[in-house]
Image (cartoon, rainbow, N blue to C red):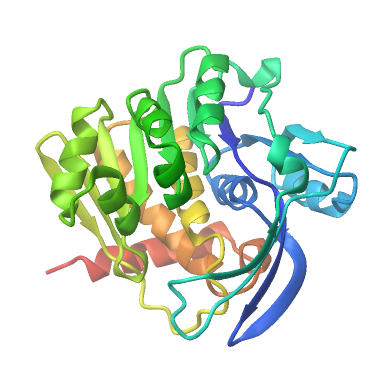
Amino acid sequence: MAKLVIVGSVALDTVKTPFGHVKDALGGAATYSSYAASFFSKPGIVGVVGPDFPKQHLELLQKRGINTEGVAVDKSGKTFRWEGYYEYDMNEAKTVSTELGVFASFKPQLPQSYRDAEYVFLANIDPELQLDVLRQVKKPRLVLLDTMNYWISNKKRQLLDVVKRVDVVLLNDAEARQLFETPNLVKAAASALKLGPKFVIIKKGEHGALLFGDGSHFSAPSYPLETIRDPTGCGDSFAGALIGYLAGKNTSDEKELRKAIIYGSVVASFNAEDFSLERLKRLAAADIEKRYKEFERIREF
């Protein structure tokens, strides 16, 4: 049985930044988040690829203890591909092309061994598909939701239906303002909490993250990186490490959630130091703990 299930995209990315370039590198929201989660627990992943997807990529995930039983191979087309670039403002990716391939007809099907999962991460996919995933899991202890501005613009009603059914909502600051039609992040979080979630996390990129609960607030710092080569997948790495930590600790209380946010920030900061999963491949538990302690010192006053 997979205690943690992550549903989202598995992709091949072509990325250019001022510090390098990769072609058809392993990417996708489910890929980054499951790899990040694997430092704390053993997740199961749900996604779809085409027959062109390199076998060694699946083997890499499996070697990290990630269950890939839920990754379907659809022979009708090619793997989802994204091409983009960053300029010196590394907070904004500029898309060159998106080829959805088999991801366009993706219908998540959870293996029976996934349906008793206690922790679920609904990565950035169509909110109607996210609702379908929720119908397939039996009684999860904690569900984390991510989304993007495209779904806010095109399927807002369905997205709000998902928000009502999850425990933690994850948005960046622009998405929070757009979804709840306010420039004020505190008001946006309050509006989200009224719909039913226990917590709202608002990511602020290089400026850290905010956690809002019922009458509580926590501000997490960012890590002052000297080397940023490619920020692709940092948000997904943050989410994956966060829910992976909670699953590993078998908890969902606010005290541990605050720690989980810091661990998410730690893993995301490492992810930005190289392209694709290259930095995370070299990452050790001791590296994570050392940077976690640095985050603690950043917050001392």
Percent across and percent down for residue 53 are 85, 50
Residue at 41 percent of width and 54 percent of height: 263
Q: Please name the residue shown 21% across and 33% down the image.
A: 193
Residue 165 higher or lower than 14, as above or below: above
Q: Is residue 294 above or below residue 126?
A: below
Residue 297 rendering spot, x and y as whole percentages: 25, 68
Specify the quadrant that holds the N terminus.
Answer: top right
Image location (x, y in percent) of residue 31? 65, 49
Q: Is residue 66 visible?
A: no
Q: Is residue 4 visible?
A: yes
Extreme residue toward the front, this view = 154
Check the image and report above or below for 177 versus 84.
above
Residue drawn at point x = 27 percent, y = 65 percent: 221
- Give coordinates of residue 230: x percent, y percent: 57, 74
Seen from the viewer's position, the closer of residues 180 and 79 is: 180
Q: Nearer the viewer, residue 235 or 251?
A: 235
Q: In what quadrant of the picture does the C terminus appear?
A: bottom left
